[in-house]
Amino acid sequence: MKDGIVNVMKPPGITSHDVVNSLRKVYHTKKVGHTGTLDPDALGVLPVCIGQATRLAEYLVDKEKEYRVMLKFGIATDTGDNSGEIVERGGNSSLSREEFVELTKKFIGKIQQMPPKYSAIKKDGQPLYKLARAGVEVEIEPRTVEIYDIKVLMYNETEALLNVRCGKGTYMRSLCEDLAKGCGTVGHMCYLMRNQSGIYRIEDAIRLDALEASENPEQYLRPMSEALKDLPQAVVSDETVKMRLQNGLSQKIQFPQTPSQGQTAWVSDEQGNLLAIGSWQNESFQPHKVFKVGEEDENI
């Protein structure tokens, strides 16, 4: 089994964890993890790490996301999307298209957002959605999120179609509810598709059913190094240096551009195989995570 990242086109109707369970069977390994939950009703890009690549998840979660989202005015649900029970009804949007576009601009930048009570965020070690299903009332704190851009693709008094670019932890369901409130009514998210997560885009994604049916699923694995391409990289060929790196020892390594003090960087061999991720400390590279080239993984 090879290590790598597969750009999955998640279908609607299943959870992100369902995708992980499926790929454990496809790739015959327990080492599988996704890089950011996508709502069960949503579809789109879900990068999934296989094998040693699971140790790269932290470098993928923080990347920019892009969503296509439909807001439906006049109905609020307890989940914030189509899957929930209706909790409130209201009228149509009271704004013109121009006024609505101006409203969306108020949400661009760093904002305070209240996460949905049906979400994967944990409170006292329990996901909020489990507490909500059990009828447990909990106090949810607003969180700082960042929205880079909102484009209004379609708008009328009953619904709006948006393209949103944002940072990690931003909930489209909450954005839809807040926008509806700004329009003088209630609303919910009735459609969500993730077009991009970091460097992984929807036009390059492989459908889950195609992966499950493939006789050679390893062809869809993308190299681990892709997750690190925006970080400083050095290539080493000396076998002694490689061995010392893989033992976690600090090394004097020549980078094309010297990293700044404390900056995260990575080292590969001549074939592009990831050897170590670490930081630049006192003119040396200090490994924090080391990777074994060709390491065999335990099959299920």
Image: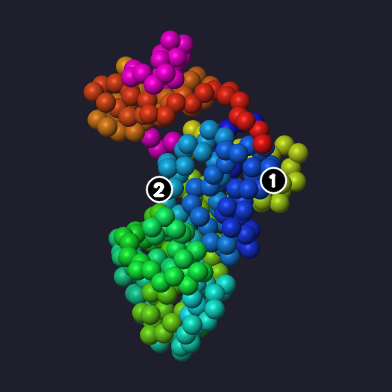
- In the picture of the structure, the residue carrying the numbered disc 2 is 62
| Marks 1 and 2, the one that precedes in the sequence | 2
Position of 27 with respect to 202 (left or right) is: right
Q: Position of residue 78 (x, y in %)?
A: 49, 76
**In the picture, residue 94 is in which quadrant?**
bottom left
* Mark 1: few/some/many CA within 10 Å (<14, 14-19, 20+): many
State the scheme by which the image is colored. rainbow
Rendered view: 182 above or below 222: below
Position of 10 with respect to 107 (left or right) is: right
Q: Which mark is residue 211?
A: 1
Position of 182 with respect to 29 (left or right) is: left
Residue 103 visible (yes or no): yes
Task: Label 1, secondary structure: give it.
Answer: helix
Q: Magenta stretch: give its range.
A: 228-251
Hey, what amino acid is under mark 1? Leu
Instruction: Report the quarter where the N terminus lies.
Output: top right
Q: Kindly indicate whether the residue at mark 2 contacts the one at mark 1 (C-beta within 8 angstroms).
A: no
Hey, what amino acid is under mark 2? Asp
**In the picture, residue 289 is in which quadrant?**
top left
* Mark 2: few/some/many CA within 10 Å (<14, 14-19, 20+): some
Residue drawn at 66 percent across, 33 percent down:
299
**In the picture, residue 284 is in which quadrant?**
top left
